[in-house]
Structures are given as structure tokens and as C-alpha cells.
Image (spheres, rainbow, N blue to C red):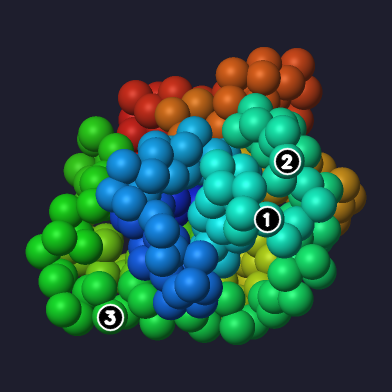
Amino acid sequence: MEDLYALDFDGVICDSCEETALSAVKAAKVRWPSLFDGVDSALEDWIVDQMHALRPVVEAGYDTLLLVRLLLEMRLPSLRKSSVAEGLTVEEILENWLKIKPVIMEEWSENREALIELSGKVRDEWMDTDFTTWIGANRLYPGVSDALKLASSRIYIVTSNQSRFVETLLRELAGVTIPPDRLYGLETGPKVKVLKQLQKKPEHQGLRLHFVEDRLATLKNVIKEPELDGWNLYLAGWGYNTQKERDEAASMPRIQLLQLSDFCTKLK
């Protein structure tokens, strides 16, 4: 029986944490220029460092802009416009981001679509003006490039990243050109919806279905859908998740905790 693998991109195939953090700071400066008037390079470096720690809560690129501003408000009381920043810690953001996010979106009067557009525009400009540095801020996880090239299974990329960036990174870092019909990016909607589409395709009937993801919350959303009971689910242990999440996943019968070397072997 043939296998079909639906793979998340960031945190499964590509470690984009550095690029995501730097892009977020660039975009935040465009969105809220006055907030950065008194921000020196040391504070910027601190924000980028904290963004690495907060990467597990990022679902879509625009989350990163919100996190940058929230970190600024945590460090600089004079800038505070949100009710949550005072006394807030990085650990509390990791624990409560889904509750914090709608509060700050409303208090800052922000718009999801506008933030998504800005996030993509800033990354496009960085690619256009300094492609080498942009590419250099991303890296593939060890062994993944060869595994993708040698894969005997049907491979689909299902990601909340924007498709054009994923295409570029796969081409430049892995030497892999993925057909457009095998890439489902941010534009194609929630991952649960994409998995339903994939399993309904006539050419996929009878295949073993596997979904590899690094966000436990996304896997939990899949489990809530009885229609998706046929998918084998894996949490990427090398990706953007916490030890607490890995421990929780290990206790869930539907989810297999996967290590990088096993993942590469499975694809081949």
C-alpha cells in the first residue's frame, strides 16, 4: 500500500525561526514606527531572542508582529496600550497566547488581513533587496533535503506560511521544485479543511494517510474531526513545541511523537 504524507513546513522541514523573528521586527517598524523611536539595538536583539522562545505559539506570520509589539510593551511601560502587558512574562505568553491574542487585537484596533498583507510585503522586499541574507536566515533540518529528494511516498506541503516563500526556500535550500498542486499555503485555508480535501481525491483512495505537524494545537483540531479518523498523526519532536506539549502528545493514543531521524527514514 502506498503512503501519502502531508507535511507542515516551518518546524518540520525548515527552521525559519531567525527569519521569522527578523521579518517581524522589520514589519512592526513599518506598522508602528513611533513605537520604535527610542528602541536601541540591544532592545531589538532582546526582542529577537524572545521571539525564538515564543515561536511555539506562532500559527501564522502575522502573530509575530503582535508578539513584537507585546514584548515592547512589556519592556517599555510608556508604550503600553494593552491591558495585559504589565507584569507579563514569556512563560505566561506561551501558556495563554490564544486568550491574549484577541484582547490585544481589539485593544490595538488591528486587522488580521492588513497584518498578513504587511507581513508578506516586508518579506518580499527583504527577498528582493537582500536575497542572500534572507535565505541565510532560514535552514533546513538535517537530512530533510535528501529525504524529500528520495521520497517514495506522495508528498504534500500543508502550511500556514505563504506559498511563494515555501516554493523559494525548497528550491534554494533543498534543490526541490514542488508542483503547485502539491503545495497548500496560507491562502488555501485551515489545515483541517486541506486534509479533508486530500483524502477525498479519487487518486488518494486506498493510500495510507500521514500528517506531520509541529503544533500540538493543530493536531488536536484534527482529532476533533471524526471525518479525519483515517489519518496517522505525528508531532515533530524537533519542531516548535515545548517539553510540556511533547509530554502531552506522548499520552495521546492518536498522536505519535516523531524524531527527526525517524521522519527522514519514513519519507524514503
Q: Nearer the viewer, residue 97 or 151?
A: 97
Dot 2 corresponds to which residue?
86
Q: Is residue 163 visible?
A: no
Question: With respect to residue 144, does 5 lie above or below?
Answer: below
Could you tell me how far apart the alpha carbons at marks 3 and 2 are, in whole angstroms? 34 Å
Question: With respect to residue 128, does 46 lie above or below?
Answer: above
Dot 1 corresponds to which residue?
80
Could you say which quadrant of the image residue 96 lies in? top right
Secondary element under disc 2, as helix, strand or loop, is loop
Q: Is residue 170 left or right of residue 2?
A: left
Dot 3 corresponds to which residue?
125
Mark with earlier residue (2, 1): 1
Q: Are marks 3 and 2 in contact (CB under 8 Å)?
A: no
Q: Residue at x 73, y 41 (%)?
A: 86
Q: Are marks 2 and 1 in contact (CB under 8 Å)?
A: yes
Secondary element under disc 1, as helix, strand or loop, is loop
Label at residue 88: none
Q: Nearer the viewer, residue 11 or 259?
A: 11
Q: Residue at x 81, y 69 (%)?
A: 106
Q: Residues within 10 Å of mark 2 (few under 14, many from 20)?
A: some
Closer to the eye: label 1 or 3 = 1
Could you tell me how far apart the alpha carbons at marks 2 and 1 are, in whole angstroms? 8 Å
The image position of residue 30, as x and y in percent, is 43, 77
Q: Residue at x 61, y 58 (%)?
A: 79
